[in-house]
Image: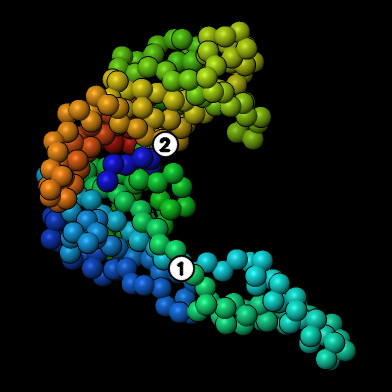
């Protein structure tokens, strides 16, 4: 249940659906196993898995949701190999070369023939809605997976407004100041991993691990105009993570200090989930708010 990556989205207006109304809305797009001739299936699944029936699990003002995807694994190499054999057979039989459209049609026919025989793979993507502070937090390191979940949510909740947060100050500029040793905010400690890039987003990238940021080499890169695009941080000795210039958070890890505070309901998985979920969302809310604050806050939020 513990999130390992965060992609943040702002709700553009107050979220007024309660638990039951949200569950009913998601029931319009539930997950179904992938059909034999379908390349994939995508829909909402129970956050509690076999321990739950609803498509939403709510604790306080936080609601957990889960998108599930099943896709058939049909490697392009398999299709291309059989396509080459089929093309060769036809060209020899008809004493001519097949055109591009004929090859494409053959490829589509082969794909439909092979799909029912392909293995399937299931993946899940969790997210939670923070009604009070109007956040949608998605647990993924993939922009594509986050966009898939957002698209499904928009299909399920007509009129929902979501956007990625925009800060008053540039994370690139601010994190570069931190790496220089300037204005490191209270509650944050620099880690030993960072990525620097020239101001041009297509410029060269330098990745550093376990290297002293105060070294002449690193400071020389900053003086030459490179800026920090990723930086590992430790927040109040409770959460460690890598922060990107786009405000995505990866490799999130809760420290032993937090684990020692958790209640343990090992005999009841639902109570354990509720306890962990409540604890996690409270910690992440405080951390996210402080991360946003060090960059001047969300420039487009005026009515929270």
Please give the name of the residue rendered at 49% of the width and 29% of the height, measured from the top-left corner.
Answer: 230
**Residue 256 to residue 57: above or below:** above
**Residue holding disc 1:** 120
Identify the residue under disc 2: 250
Q: Of the residues under marks 2 and 1, which one precedes in the sequence?
A: 1
Whether residue 51 appears in this view of the structure is: yes
Identify the residue at horizontal 62%, vertical 26% (top origin).
206
Q: Quadrant of the C terminus?
A: top left
Badge 2, how many Cα within 10 Å: few under 14, some, many 20+?
A: many
Q: Position of residue 202 (x, y in %)?
A: 64, 35
Locate residue 8: give its quadrant.
Answer: top left
Residue found farthest to the front: 267
Using the image as rendered, state which of residue 147 and residue 3 is in the foreground: 3
Mark 2: which secondary structure? strand
Q: Whole-percent x and y of residue 105?
A: 66, 81
Residue 204 position in % (x across, y down): 66, 29
Marks 2 and 1: which is nearer the front? Answer: 1
Q: Quadrant of residue 208?
A: top right
Which circle marks residue 43 in the picture? Answer: none
């Amino acid at each position: 249940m513990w999130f390992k990556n965060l992609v943040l989205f702002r709700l553009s207006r107050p979220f007024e659906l309660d638990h039951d109304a949200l569950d009913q809305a998601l029931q319009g797009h539930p997950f179904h196993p992938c059909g034999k001739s379908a390349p994939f299936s995508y829909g909402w699944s129970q956050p509690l898995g076999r321990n739950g029936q609803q498509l939403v699990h709510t604790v306080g003002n936080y609601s957990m949701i889960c998108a599930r995807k099943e896709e058939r694994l049909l490697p392009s190499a398999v299709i291309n190999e059989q396509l080459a054999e089929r093309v060769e057979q036809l060209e020899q039989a008809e004493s001519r070369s097949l055109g591009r459209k004929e090859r494409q049609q053959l490829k589509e026919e082969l794909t439909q023939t092979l799909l029912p025989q392909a293995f399937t793979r299931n993946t899940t993507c969790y997210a939670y809605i923070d009604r009070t502070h109007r956040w949608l937090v998605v647990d993924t390191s993939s922009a594509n997976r986050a966009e898939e979940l957002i698209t499904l949510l928009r299909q399920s909740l007509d009129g929902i407004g979501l956007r990625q947060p925009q800060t008053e100050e540039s994370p690139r500029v601010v994190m570069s100041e931190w790496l220089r040793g300037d204005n490191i905010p209270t509650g944050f400690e620099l880690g030993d991993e960072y990525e620097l890039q020239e101001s041009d987003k297509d410029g060269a990238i330098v990745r550093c691990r376990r290297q002293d940021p105060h070294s002449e080499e690193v400071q020389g890169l900053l003086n030459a105009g490179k800026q920090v695009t990723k930086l590992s941080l430790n927040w109040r000795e409770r959460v460690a993570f890598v922060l990107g210039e786009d405000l995505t958070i990866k490799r999130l890890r809760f420290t032993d200090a937090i684990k020692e505070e958790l209640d343990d309901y090992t005999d009841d998985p639902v109570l354990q989930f509720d306890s962990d979920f409540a604890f996690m969302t409270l910690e992440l809310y405080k951390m996210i708010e402080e991360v946003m604050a060090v960059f001047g806050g969300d420039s487009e939020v005026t009515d929270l």
